[in-house]
Image (tube, grey):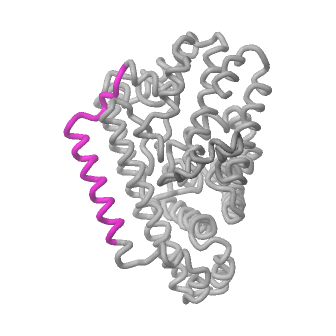
Amino acid sequence: LNFAWSRLANRMPFTVYYGVAWAFHIAVLFSNDIYKGYRFAWISPSLQWLDDMGMGIMRWHVLFNMSTLRMLGFLYDVWESATGKTDQLRADQEAKHAENCADCAETKTPCYRLRTCIPRPRAEYSLAHYLAFITYIPLYIGGPLTSFNAYVSHLHTPQRAFDGRKCAVYGARIVMLYLTLVGLLHVNHLSTLRKDDGAFDRMTVPDKMLYGILFLAFLWLKFNLIWKFFRLVAIFDGVEAPEDMNRCFSNTTTVADFWRDWHASFNQWIVRYMYVPMGGNRAKAATIVPIFVFIAVWHDIELHLLWWAGIMCVAFVPELVVGTWFSKKCRWMRDRPYYRHVRALGCALSTLSLVIANLFGYGTGMSSAKGVEGLAGSAVMGLWTLVFLFSSSNIGLQERAVRSEAEMRRKVQCGLVKSQ
């Protein structure tokens, strides 16, 4: 049905074409959750034996959530290729990357972003390519997400960014992540505490705060391990998916930066296939609520995830307002020696909001409410928590500065920027 709908891309307004597709796929997500999959016996009692074979190791309708993103992305890519402006779009994007992209300059091949932005020839949006993209084994279960345009581009021009040495180093990082995760779970039984509804309420205030930070570290290690492993498998196959977990969870300056670095491939998907079609920067404030609600529903249709989405919106809107005001009114502060410390304080507050949001969404769920109230009532613990997060944020900002300098050196070496 999704592929058949894509054939109508140039026969109706974009809002109808894409809006109907979104409504259909969200309805399917709710249907999958309500029925927990579907039974062959509903079609005919004679097919009952297929249901009796078992559901396998993983439920298919959970994995289908990833396929939903790929199908929606495919529809947008098809529409973009049908606009008749592909040549101009290709020329603009290639010129932009030729001037600024160190990845393109180093490998002499298009980077992921360029591969995604350039539409493919209409003939390549075929059923064979579509099915191969939807069911691509290395990235099928957990990602990272890649676009249809980039996937087909890699079929013609495999990635060159990773040679044997870089793959070995990347593999060693994955092994270290695994060992660190095992070590953390060996001494901190985070998953067990998560399943005990009353455990969080029985903790002392310092324990609650430590649990929140450690649980965020656990999520970072777990997803980092999964995404990097499957990404490496895809790299061996010539497909370079976006890098998820670009930074440590504690090295974040804003909530927006956190999500841009955490599930980076999903963030790029949200920007291209949801944020831009909804108006982009012209409607930034209006897109926050639908985006975070969709992220929550997409993960799982649970009340605690809707609470998570609400907390993220509450944290994001003031950050957006303050950030806009600060960039206009306080430009003079950037040259002051204390500017880094002002940013670090903002980082600490952002990290604190992320800890609380993830306790609701992925930690102890709704049982976190009383525990969070207890944290709010402890001024001493709140102060020490901010001191700790402020200190770690200063370290993170310094690391960001080092990365920025390294990226500038790359551009100088590639001839994109003149050395000073």
- Taking the image as shown, residue 407 lies to the left or right of residue 369, namely left
In the rendered image, the vertical position of residue 215 relative to residue 337, given as above or below: below
Closest to the observer: 314 or 359? 359
Residue 312 spot, x, y in % from top left: 66, 59
The question of residue 270 being in magenta is answered with no
Question: In the rendered structure, which segment of residues is drawn in magenta?
Answer: 157-183
* Residue positioned 71% across, 55% down in the render: 317
Q: Main secondary structure of the magenta part?
A: helix
In the rendered image, the vertical position of residue 251 relative to residue 26, given as above or below: below
Closest to the observer: 332 or 317? 317
Residue 29 spot, x, y in % from top left: 69, 46
Q: In which image quadrant can residue 185 be found?
A: bottom left
- Taking the image as shown, residue 183 lies to the left or right of residue 258, namely left
Q: Residue furthest front?
A: 46
Q: Where's the N terminus, which quadrant?
A: top right
Q: Is residue 315 visible?
A: no
